[in-house]
Image (spheres, rainbow, N blue to C red):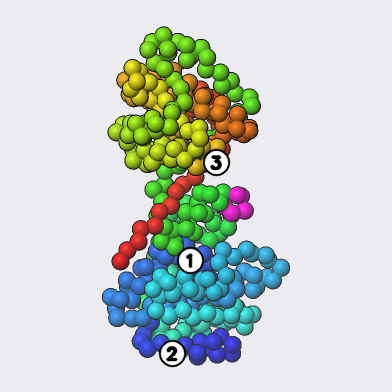
Amino acid sequence: MQVEEELTKLVPERDTLLTIGVFDGVHRGHQYLISQLKEKAERGGFLSGVVTFRQHPQTALSPETKLPYLTDLDERASLLRGVGVGLVAVLSFTPELAQLGAREFISLLKRRLRMRGLVIGPDFALGRGREGDVVTLQAMGDEMDFSVTVIPPMVLDGEVVSSTAIRKALAAGQQGVSVAFDLATHRGYDSDRKTRVDLEVDLERTDLDTSDAEKRLRAEGIVLRRAHPAEIATASRFALENFSAVWQAEVAHSADFCPPPLFIALEADRVVAFAAYDVDGTARFGPMGTLPSYRRRGIGAALLKMCLRSIRDNGYLRSEIGWAGPIGFYARTVNARIHRAYWTFGKSLVD
Ligand SMILES: CC(C)(COP(=O)(O)OP(=O)(O)OC[C@H]1O[C@@H](n2cnc3c(N)ncnc32)[C@H](O)[C@@H]1OP(=O)(O)O)[C@@H](O)C(=O)NCCC(=O)NCCS
């Protein structure tokens, strides 16, 4: 019997606690089940093990079914070992295996893999025609001396995390959100799950004239103009003192270009607002900031338009505003539209 041959290759050095499944994607739901398995195995002095299948039972039983995999066998096995499972048994899901009764399958696992317990999800079933469901297995466990632990599925935002849900999301093109989250986190990435937005401005169809605003502000003692190279240090200090070190660095970067891609608002030679663009050479707008006591006077809108006009004069028809904060401000002043929304992922390194 092929299944027996495959199992013979493995000789566990201790009694085992097993879970069984395809584990396509080794996603967060799988990882949760496996963490419970490992914990229980450690407590009982068992070796934790995963029995997985070379091919999905669904495709093995009806070859005409095309089922896209999230991970191939090699990746699956290495991810399973990566999450610290003591033993990974890979079985071919042959018609012969499909015909095996639940009792025969369990006997094989006991004999070959020294199985003393199963850790499974509530919908799990094994054996011919799924005859070995949770209730049947529990009864069998009493009789054949092995434990059955049922772990509830992991739920995220009201939805059970499953390979099927991830495949569906992929097919529906929702890659950026749920799939990235489910798949990326299993490699140790974490998301703060805040949505970020990049905006887009159509430079051809947006009124970027600022002559009236500039005239009005000048009458109020505020001058708007492009920064001279000698003023970049002052402007970057302004960005640090009133906003952040990241913005300071971005403003300082404008010294790399001539003329500097930086506009400022001055009152009696003192900087009260700034707006930068193209600091990374990609025609993107930002950052910008107005001192709180000078806000809502039209300074921000005018500086923004002056920057966008320069981007347009450089030959661009559109500009992006990356990681935009005040979406309402950009939408109202220059008719900005959402270009993309995304989550960011971070990975902390540990010693
Ligand atoms: C965003 C910011 C630069 C706007 O500067 P400002 O000088 O106040 O802008 P304006 O006075 O030209 O505002 C223009 C219009 O946008 C509106 N507006 C200003 N800030 C807004 C905000 N945060 N959300 C929604 N609308 C806003 C104003 O009410 C005004 O509308 P109105 O003409 O109908 O009155 C300023 O609020 C700021 O420095 N914020 C903190 C830094 C920041 O978020 N920078 C952007 C990083 S992506």
Report the residue that reaches farthest toward the front: 230
| Label number found at residue 11 | 2
Quarter of the view holding residue 138: bottom left
Q: Earlier in the sequence, mark 2 or mark 3?
A: 2
Please state the horizontal and vertical placement of residue 101, each as a whole percent of the image. 55, 81
Amino acid type at circle 2 is Val
**Magenta stretch prevailing secondary structure:** helix
Residue type for callout 3: Thr
Q: Is there a contact, CB below 8 Å, between mark 1 and mark 2?
A: no
Q: How much space separates mark 1 and mark 2, taking CA atoms?
A: 24 Å
N-term mark: 1 or 3: 1
Q: Secondary structure at mark 2?
A: loop
Residue 26's label in the rendered image is: 1
Image position of 344 (left or right of 96) = left
Q: Which label sits in the foreground, 1 or 3? A: 3
* Disc 3: which residue: 282
Residue placed farthest to the right in the image?
64
The span from disc 2 to disc 3 (Cα, nearest Å) is 58 Å
Which residue occupies 50% across, 68% down?
23
Q: CA distance from mark 1 to mark 3?
A: 38 Å
As for residue 171 lying within the magenta part, the answer is yes
Give, as a single range, the part of the protein colored magenta: 169-173
Q: Quadrant of the C terminus?
A: bottom left
Quick check: is the Cβ at mark 2 less than 8 Å away from ligand 1? no
Residue at 41% from the left image edge and 9% from the top image edge: 219
Q: Residues within 10 Å of mark 3 (few under 14, many from 20)?
A: few
Q: Tag 1: residue type?
A: Val
